[in-house]
Image: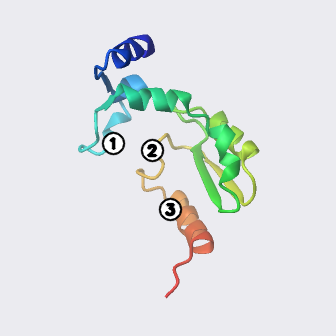
């Protein structure tokens, strides 16, 4: 796909790529996406995602706070990716791993996740009235 995308891009052509060819999501989890989700992306999106190195830039977020959430058994993205981000981030950074959930942890309505995110936001992103 990458070779074909580069070839077409060099010729000035557009190539659309199905979302599940970019990030493989098991059919059983796909119902967690909104029905209005975009299902195809231009090849340039694929190329930019492929070339992006989060571990190289995550340290630049500080001194702004960073919250990393990850299922301990994610079937879409390896948990190690969040652990690596945490290792490359600077403080203040929080990493939370959640058991008994999969990739779409915010969509599942898990009270533990909701409470943690809500508390973190109140602490780190307070609203001023």
Mark 3 touches mark 2? (CB < 8 Å): no
Quarter of the figure that contains the N terminus? top left
Q: Bin the neighbour count of mark 3 within 10 Å (Cα to Cα): few under 14, some 14-19, many 20 and up.
A: some
Q: Which numbered disc flags the more N-terminal residue, 1 or 3?
A: 1
Secondary structure state at the residue bearing disc 3: helix
Q: Bin the neighbour count of mark 1 within 10 Å (Cα to Cα): few under 14, some 14-19, many 20 and up.
A: few
- On the image, the x and y values in percent for residue 47 come to 46, 26
Q: Which residue lies furthest to the left in this view?
A: 36
Q: Locate residue 106 relative to residue 69 in the image: left or right.
A: left
Determine the image quadrant of residue 83. top right
What residue does disc 2 label? 104
Determine the image quadrant of residue 85. top right
Secondary structure state at the residue bearing disc 2: loop
User: From where the camera sits, is residue 48 visible?
Assistant: yes
User: From where the camera sits, is residue 25 visible?
Assistant: no
Secondary structure state at the residue bearing disc 1: loop
Residue in the picture at 55% in, 62% down: 117
Residue in the picture at 33% in, 29% down: 42
Mark 1 touches mark 2? (CB < 8 Å): yes
Q: How far apart are marks 1 and 2 (CA)?
A: 8 Å
Q: Locate residue 34 relative to residue 109 in the image: left or right.
A: left
* In this view, the mark in front (1 or 3): 1
In the image, residue 100 sits, relative to residue 118, either above or below, namely above
What residue does disc 1 label? 33
Q: Which numbered disc flags the more N-terminal residue, 3 or 2?
A: 2
Q: Which of 37 and 52 is in front in this view?
A: 52
**Labelled disc at residue 114:** 3
Q: Bin the neighbour count of mark 2 within 10 Å (Cα to Cα): few under 14, some 14-19, many 20 and up.
A: some
């Amino acid at each position: 796909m990458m070779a074909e995308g580069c070839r077409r891009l060099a010729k000035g052509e557009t190539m659309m790529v199905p979302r599940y060819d970019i990030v493989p999501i098991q059919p059983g989890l796909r119902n967690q996406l909104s029905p209005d989700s975009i299902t195809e992306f231009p090849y340039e999106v694929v190329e930019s995602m492929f070339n992006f190195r989060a571990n190289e830039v995550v340290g630049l977020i500080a001194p702004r706070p960073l919250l990393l959430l990850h299922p301990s058994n994610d079937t879409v993205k390896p948990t190690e990716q969040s652990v690596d981000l945490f290792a490359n981030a600077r403080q203040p950074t929080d990493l939370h791993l959640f058991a008994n959930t999969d990739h779409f942890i915010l969509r599942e309505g898990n009270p533990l996740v909701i409470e943690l995110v809500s508390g973190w936001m109140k602490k780190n992103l307070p609203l001023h009235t």
